[in-house]
Image (cartoon, rainbow, N blue to C red):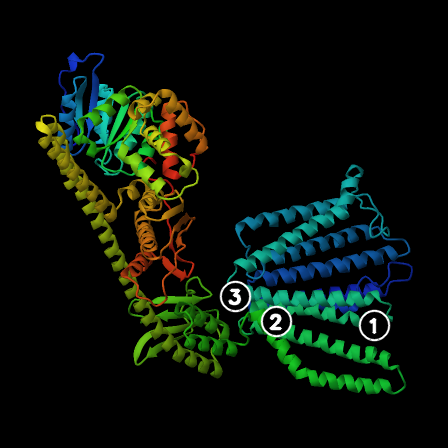
Amino acid sequence: MTKSRGALLGTVLVLIAAAFVGSFWLSVHRPRGFPDATTFDAIWVAPFLAFPAVGALIMSRRPRNVIGLLLVGIGATMALSLLLTELSRDLAATPSMSPAATPVYLVGDNLIKVGLAGVAVLLLLFPDGALLSPRWGWVLWGMVVAVALAISASLLSGSRLDEGHLPPSPLAWPPARPLADAMRGPLGLAIFGAFLVVCGVSVVLRYRAGREITRRQLKWVALAVGVFAIAEFVTNLVGLAHVPGWVNQVLLVPPSAAAIGVAAAIAIAILRHQLYDINVVISRTLAYGAMAGVIALVYAVGLVGVGAAVGSRAGSNVILAIIATAAVAVIFQPLRVRLERAANRVVYGQRATPYELLSGFTRRAVEGYAADDAIDLLAKAMADGLTAEAAAVRIGAADGTCVLVCWPGPGAPAGRALREVIVKDQGEELGALLIWRTDPFNETEERLLNDLAAHAGLLLRKRGLTAELRHRLDELRASRQRLVAAQDEERRRIERDLHDGAQQQLIAIGARLGLAEGSAVGDEQARLFAELKAEVASALDDLRSLGRGLSPPLLESQGLKGALTALARRASVNVELRVDPGRFGREVEAAVYFCISEALQNASKHSGASRVLIEVEGRDDRLDFAVRDDGHGFVAGAKRGSGIQNMVDRMEVLGGGLQISSGPHGTEVSGWMPLMRVKAPPRESL
Amino acid sequence: MEAGLLLATRFGWQTSDAMIRVVLAEDSYLVREGVTRVLDLAQDVELVASVTDATALHAAVDQFKPNVVVTDIRMPPTFSDEGIVAANTLHDTHPGLGVVVLSQFDEPEYAIKLLERGSANRAYVLKDRLSEPAALLAAIHEVAHGGSLIDPAVVERLVDARTRFESSSLATLSKREWEVLSLMAQGCTNEAIADRLFLSTGVVEKHSNAIFSKLQLTEERDINRRVKAVLIYLAEGKPSR
């Protein structure tokens, strides 16, 4: 910062302070009979001064920071406004009532509007000085128009000013009066309120869309504003009761202190947010705030409640106070622990301080928490535990193929990391931990980082092994799937060969026998022809059922419903069908048909069932089926054929599953598989 | 096998009104030969074209304007159920054209699909029936004159399945009523049923009334709708739709 700018800032700050103090002085020393000295209390000078001071502080560190400039601007505007308003009242209080009083009041009064609009703009721009998106520029322009309207309204209105103490504006234009008065009253308030809400929405959206850093900055201010709101609320609540005047004065201290806190929070959010962990501050605030409340309650109950019950006697108050103090002393430690834990849960979710966070992370990692998740947790633990701007885990050596898992993401921040710790396991480089932070590490943090790197070695090793295993498993599943698909294709091919070859030949032979039969001579020949034809017919029947067993043509042309209807008709038990008429793709239909026909065969051959219910239901993303019989079930542990294993295989190949339950009153085979449902069959549906 | 038209037009100019002009669609050479020979036997049936797939079938129908199409079910290019798809398409494009589906499959599901748009001019005949030339010729005559015919073996399969287990309403039918019912499913008119069972038409009508009331089916006077209703009842064990 150059000297001249520093001098300028200092001067501005001094002038603002002088204006506040001056207006206070003016309001106090006004002759009786005029607006009295309660315009604002001395105690509020400090917080009013705090905001421009913070603005100046920010500007001294970051000369181009918009927020700093805005804060100084708002402070100056407000100070000037107050000074002019008070001045106008003093002018009005002169015996001859100076004609300058009204114009001076108008300028002062309108400056407040500009200042308040500045507060709304602050909400729109905090913390980085830029709008959330260019679209929010419209809000900015809307605000400019609204302020211009409000100023015009105060100039054009013919009403007396300052609650009737001052004559109306010299620019008064009677036709505009109703609208102008509305603008000065509820309408203007509503418009300002609406803008404030919109700007608040911008803050919420910014928090939700923001990265971790933005969130932390917003959290600082939100914490301070929250404390301020509570202090204000409590003060007003107590103020409702009839308390002595000095109590009222004292009660003004907490909210004004909290207001200074808001200014301080803005400064920290802009300048020092990386140094302090806001989450720790919030959790401590919650814990100690709650503790103060509980202790106050214990005291109140102890002194008032017990005192009333026992009957207040001289001297008993002291004893009660001692008892209450003792009670507080007894509950203090366990209460603190509980409340801290609760506050930590509120703020951090599960873990508490960075150390607990890290130790919790390593415990979970060692327990074998899902490996992919663990890497994310590691990055998060580093970022949170070391209050870093960002942290990342590099998987793989830097000179080979590597993957970067970042927190808060997405992607790693630009620029070099402050620290890169190579992660090794048994001498082999497995990856690295990277931290982006502006401040250097202290000794504890160094130790922490090294501990983490040691744990990360195991983690990365495990992750590598898991990935390899998963890859092999995928390969195995794929090859099993290929095998089943090839088997299905082969069955279809053989069925087609039978249909196109042997069956057609037999049909042709039958046709020729039929033709030749006409020229048969005598009973002997006629009987021979009849026999031959019957043999051809029986051979055709055999081939048909052989083909059906290989791959039922109906399944291909009419899907599960048609094929299962035909299957049920041929069964030796009574079968009831509830089958979804939809189509589900060739592999799925083949697998489900296979399983159902296998289950139906088991039910009719071995279970002694008289009835079987077959259900197939397709939903959006999965298909369920079940085959239930009323037979005697199979004995648990009895030797099962390869049939069930084949069914399980066929389901698992397509990512589905099979469940078999059996009891003395029947057996149920149920299965499911994931679907990519065929919306409409590719050809005309028959 | 080469697709398209296998020219087999003969004596086209001599066709009289009584002549039934037939287009055959069948991708197996052996079966094509068999059908051709069976058709040769009939004086009033003339094979005007033979094709080997459904696309060529539609072209041949437009070109030769046959009275009856005799078609296989499974043909190139997808070898699924092209014959039945073609029959249903022809129902819209060429109403009144007879279609005999020659099938290697005895599942009634195919026959029911064939009758989806009504049973008039439709016959479902197993290829096994080629050994009885009269059966195929009867089917051709039936569809040429607006009737319908379902292969007895297919109906038998349905009746078998239905009679194997106790089934609510079907169990109440008498043996004679079963005979009448299966002939109805085969596409026979009351007169034809009377002929086959050596009964009078009046008696057949009485049986028919009894059957429909026992099965709680609305009695279909229209013979074409009756075939389908009975067939679906037998296949699914309950009234359709």
Evaluate whether label 1 is on the same chain as label 2: yes
Evaluate whether label 2 is on the same chain as label 3: yes
Contact (Cβ within 8 Å) of mark 1 with mark 2: no
Residue A104 in the image, given as x and y percentages of width and height: 78, 53
Task: Measure the C-alpha gap from mark 1 to mark 2.
Answer: 29 Å
The residue to which callout 1 is attached is A247
Examine the rendered structure and indicate whether residue A678 appears above or below residue A507. below
- Residue A282 marker: 2
Between label 1 and label 2, give the one nearer the viewer. Answer: 2
**Residue type, numbered disc 3:** Ile
The residue to which callout 3 is attached is A213
Examine the rendered structure and indicate whether residue B100 appears above or below residue A32. above
**Residue type, numbered disc 1:** Val
Residue B164 in the image, given as x and y percentages of width and height: 34, 43
User: Sequence-wise, which precedes: disc 1 or disc 3?
Assistant: 3
**Residue type, numbered disc 2:** Ile
Q: Residue at x 91, y 56 (%)?
A: A95
- Residue A343 marker: none
Q: Secondary structure at mark 3?
A: helix
User: Sequence-wise, which precedes: disc 2 or disc 3?
Assistant: 3
Examine the rendered structure and indicate whether residue A91 appears above or below residue A56. above
